[in-house]
Image: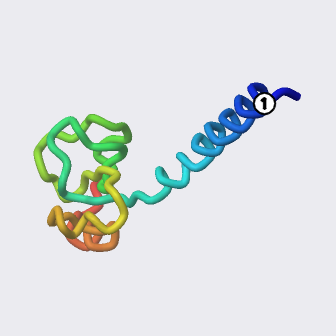
Amino acid sequence: MNQRAMIAAAAASLMSLSFVAAPAHAAEKEKCFGISKAGQNDCASISGAHSCAGQAKVDMDKGEWKYVAKGSCKQMKGLTMDEAKAVEPKKT
């Protein structure tokens, strides 16, 4: 193996490691309730009013959530899931 091929193989190995590490960063997120704008929620409402992303009807609804970087929810004045469940009654 010549030097050029060895350098290319080493570079390819390093680049593939960066792709493997990317999902670990995605896992460092948490659900933050009460911070999403209308139509910008990430998934189902806690009350069961809808089951899809982008269906929030009002800004800052305490039953709607977005994924945020872990530890940043409180800085945005958001609620944890337990706090949101305590203030958002379940719709039937």
Q: Is residue 74 above or below residue 90?
A: below
Quadrant in the rendering for residue 3: top right
Is residue 80 rendered to the left or right of residue 18? left
Which residue reaches farthest left? Answer: 59
What kind of colouring is applied to the model shown? rainbow
Is residue 37 rendered to the left or right of residue 71? left
Q: In this view, does 51 lie above or below 88?
A: above
Q: Quick one: 59 or 68, which is closer to the camera?
A: 68
Residue 29 position in % (x across, y down): 40, 57
The residue at the point 34 percent across, 52 percent down is 67
- The quadrant of the picture occupied by the C terminus is bottom left
Q: Which residue in the protein does label 1 denote? A: 3
Which residue reaches farthest front? Answer: 3
Residue 14 position in % (x across, y down): 64, 42
Quadrant in the rendering for residue 41: top left
The residue at the point 11 percent across, 46 percent down is 59
Residue 28 position in % (x across, y down): 45, 59
The residue at the point 71 percent across, 33 percent down is 7
Q: Crowdedness of circle 1 by 10 Å Cα count: few (<14), some, many (20+)?
A: few
The residue at the point 66 percent across, 35 percent down is 11
- The quadrant of the picture occupied by the N terminus is top right
Q: Which amino acid does label 1 sit on?
A: Gln
